[in-house]
Amino acid sequence: MELVLKNLGIGYGRTVVQCGLEQSLMEAGVTSLLGANGAGKSTLLRTICGLEKPLEGSVLLDGRAVAGMNEREISLRIGVVWTSRPPAAALTVSEMVAMGRQPHTGFWGRLGERDRRVCARALEDVGMSSKAERYFGTLSDGERQKVMIAKALVQECPVIIMDEPTAFLDVTSRIEIMLLMRSIAEKYHRSILLSTHDLDIALRHSHYLWLLSSNGLPMTAGTPEELLSRRAIGPYFDTPSLVFDHESRSFRTK
Amino acid sequence: MNKRTHICFAALSAALLVLFVLALLLGPVAIPAGEVWAALLGKGDPLWATIVLQSRLPQAVTALLAGAALAVSGLLLQTLFSNPLAGPSILGVSDGANLGVAVVMLSVGAGAGLGFWLTTVLAAMAGSAVVLGLIVAFARRVKSSTMLLIIGIMIGYIASSLISILNFHAAADQVHRYVMWGMGDFSSVTMDRLPYFCSFVLLALAASLLLVKPLDALLLGEAYAANLGVNVQRTRVWIMLCTGLMTAAVTAFCGPISFIGLAVPHIARLMLGSSNHHNLLPVTLLAGACLALLCSILTCLPGTSSVLPLNAVTPLFGAPVIIYVIMNRRKIHYFN
C-alpha cells in the first residue's frame, strides 16, 4: 500500500506546525522520523493515522484521503504503537495482543480459529510466546512495547506508525526494538514509520529517514548514507553551541 | 472461558437465587415459608399474600435491578475515565440526579401519582446528564485522574449546597418527604411503578451489554481505541447515556444509594482476575444484584419491626472493599 503526503499542512487549531509536506513512505522498510522537540513529529504521526485533521492537503493511502475514511477503514490500514504505556488493566499478554484483532472480529469481538493463529504467530515474532499468560502489568517496559508491537502486527495493516516507541527503554532494548521492526518490515512487507530522538540508532538501523525542522527548513528525506554524504543532517539539529559532525556521526561543541 | 470464570458465574448465580428467596422469606412480619410459596401461587391467607406480592416481591425485584444498574454504571464510568476509583457517587453523577429530584420534590410541590414519579425520573436524568457533561468537559483539560475525581467531588458539593438552599425555602412537609427519600429505600417502588422502573433499568442494562467490545478497546486508552476501529466520541456518548439513565432511574425511585457503583466492579475484578468486559460486565451485574439484595435483607432484619435506611448499610460493605483495594494496589493487576 502506498502512503503519500500531498501538500500536507499539520498543526492544532490555528497553530501551523509544518506545511507543504510532500513525501511518500518507503514500502517494506523502516523509516525513522527525526527532528528536535516542537518540529511536529507527533502531530505528523497523529495526522497520518487520522487522529488529527490536516490543516491543508492530505494523507493519501493508495490514492484515498485518510481524513475521509471512518475509524474502521483506518484501523485495517494503519496500526499504531504509542509512547505511553496503556492504562492499567488486568489483561493477559495474549488478551492484549488479541485487541489488535478487533477490526477483524464481529460485533461481540469473539476470536475465531484464524484470529488465534495470527495472535500466536505475532507473539512468536516479537519473542513473547513464553509470557502469553502473564498479566501485561507484570512486564518490563521493553516487554510491554513488544506486546504492543504484536498488537499492531495482528491488525494486519500494511502501514505501522510508532510514536517514540523506544523513549522509555534502556539502550539494548532500543536496539532490539529497531532490529525487530527491521525484520518485521522485510519479512511481512510492512511500511513502518517511527519517530525517535535516537539519531545514532536511527542512522545505523533504519532504511530511510525523514527529517523535520523546528526552524523553518523544509522536510528532507533519504537513506542514512545519502543524507550523511549530502551533509544534510546537521542543519536540522544544530544549536548555537552544538554541531553535528557528519564524519564521526556525533555532536561536538563549536 | 477458564475455570475461574465458570466458578464466578456459578457462585454468583447461586447466591443470587438464595438471596432472592431469602428476601421473599424474611421481613418485619414473620410468614412461614409454605405460606410465602402459597402466596406466590395466588393462594393462602390474603393478608400474607398482600405482604408478599405487594411489598416483598417488588422490593426484591427493585433491589436486584437497582444493584445491577448501579454496579454496571460504576464499571462503565471506571472504564470510560480509565480510573478504578470512579463511580456514580464519587463523580457527582448521583448528586446531579439528587438535585434533579430535589428540584421537583421541593419546589414543584407534592404529588404521589405515577406522573409525579416519572417527572422526578426525568429531572434526575437531566441532573445526571448535566454533571456527566461537566465531568467530560473537565476530563479534556484535566489529565490527572485523581484531580478529576476531586473535581467530581466538588461538583457533588455544589449540588448538595443547591439542595440545602432549596430545602431552606421549602415547606416542612416537602422537606420531610425529601429527607425520607434521601435515606435510600428499595421498598418505595410499588407494584404499579415496578414496570416503569424495570423498563428503564433493563433497557440501559441491555444497551450496556452491547458495548463490551468498544469497552475492551477503551482499556488501552482513547488513542489506541480509536486505532482499533472504535468511534470514541460515539462510544463515550453511549456510555454516558447508559450510566445517566441507570443512575437517574435508581436515584429517582430508590433515593441516592452510595458505594454499590464504586465497590462492586472491584469485587467483580478481584473475583475474576480480569478486566475483560465480556466476563467482567455480567459478573459485575450479578455481584451488584447480590450485594443490593443482601443490603435490602439486612435493612429489615427479622425480629425488629422498624426498617433501617439503606444508606446505613451499603457503606459497611463498600468502604472496606475500597480501602482493601487501595492498600493492596501494588499487588492488584488492574492498578499496575
Image (cartoon, grey):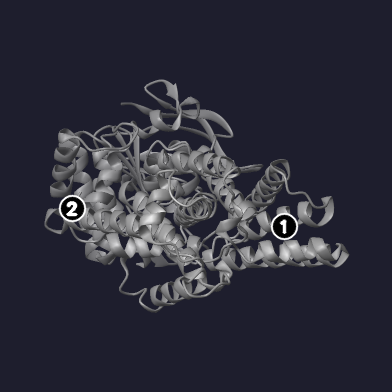
Residue on which disc 1 sits? B99
User: B157 and B70: which one is in front?
Assistant: B70
Picture layout, residue A47 above or below residue B168: above
Q: Position of residue A50 (x, y in %)?
A: 47, 36
Q: Amino acid at mark 2?
A: Asn
Q: Quadrant of the N terminus of chain A?
A: top left
Residue on which disc 2 sits? B2
Q: Chain of mark 1?
A: B
Residue A224 visible in the snapshot: yes
At 27% from the left and 32% from the top, the residue drawn is A27
Left or right of B41 on screen, residue B96: right
Q: Amino acid at mark 1?
A: Leu
Q: Nearer the viewer, mark 2 or mark 1?
A: 1
At 34% from the left and 61% from the top, the residue drawn is B269
In the displayed image of the protein, which residue is found farthest to the top? A63
Q: Chain of mark 2?
A: B
Picture layout, residue B238 above or below residue A2: below
Left or right of A84 on screen, residue A47: right
